Amino acid sequence: MRLVLVGPPGAGKGTQAQFLAAHYSIPHIATGDIFRANLKAGTALGLKAKAFMDSGELVPDAVTNEMVKERLLGADLEKGFLLDGFPRNVLQAQVLRANLAQKNSPLTAVLELSIDNAQIISRLSSRRTCKECGLPTSAQEKCPACGADLYQREDDRIEVITRRLEVYEEQTSPIIAFYRSQGLLITVSALGSVEEITQRAISALGADS
Ligand code: AMP
């Protein structure tokens, strides 16, 4: 299963990606997580990405495409992968398509999580993230998974959320039509409990292939 998960910030992509990746036994590749890990480790890549991330803008395509290309060479991808947060614009989608075509391993499907803006703002402005394991949570004090302290991502502040939503509308949402025209798009509602949404997604995607 070679899957792309797409949806606005706050649609629950990260949470669903973890469950879907476990269900299909494929690695979860989240470009935002890779950037944040680099930032935490103080690498050159992290430094390049920081200002863009903090203001809700996209990291330049050349940096992001190269990082994903390298990750897709990983030896752990025989059963496929789940890309979360990539592609974020049509150019990235085209580069991904060309890259996968070279390996004769095109995408199986693109899963869109759909949700309206009012829901997103309420979810993201109360979202906290675990300092240790990176879990996003609606808890406000300690991580429900590992008990570590939580923090508010710089880009989950209301001003930045608004900008991230604009960036999604302007730059990312055109990939929906791009994938629809290739017959790859599957849309499910991102409303309901985490389990309900996962079940909805699995029924829509079907068995591994
Ligand atoms: P996320 O965790 O997916 O919300 O990503 C957090 C931030 O990382 C985004 O707001 C961007 O600044 C950056 N980022 C993540 N994925 C990409 C991508 N595919 N292209 C450009 N920037 C990205």
Image (tube, rainbow, N blue to C red):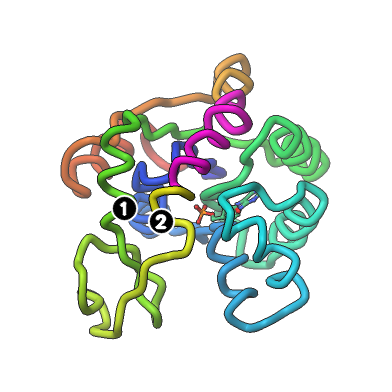
Question: Where's residue 143, x and y in %?
Answer: 25, 76
For image coordinates 52% across by 44% down, the residue present is 1
Vertical placement of residue 208 versus 138, above or below: above
Q: 10 Å neighbourhood of mark 2: few (<14), some, or many (≥20)?
A: some
Q: Is residue 95 left or right of residue 147?
A: right
Q: In this view, does 81 lie to the left or right of 91?
A: left
The secondary structure type at the circle numbered 1 is helix
- Say whether disc 2 or disc 1 marks the residue closer to the N-terminus: 1
Residue tagged 2: 157
Circle on res. 125: 1
Q: In which quarter of the image is residue 135?
A: bottom left
Vertical placement of residue 113 versus 141, above or below: above
> Which residues are drawn in magenta?
161-175
The overriding secondary structure of the stretch rendered in magenta is helix
Circle on res. 198: none
Q: Residue furthest top?
A: 181
Question: Where's residue 183, x and y in %?
Answer: 56, 18
Is 173 a magenta residue?
yes
Three-letter residue code for mark 1:
Ser
Is 190 a magenta residue?
no
Asked if disc 2 and disc 1 are in contact, CB closer than 8 Å, the reply is yes
Question: Where's residue 202, x and y in %?
Answer: 32, 39
Instruction: Specify whether residue 185 is in view.
Output: yes
Q: Quadrant of residue 127?
A: bottom left
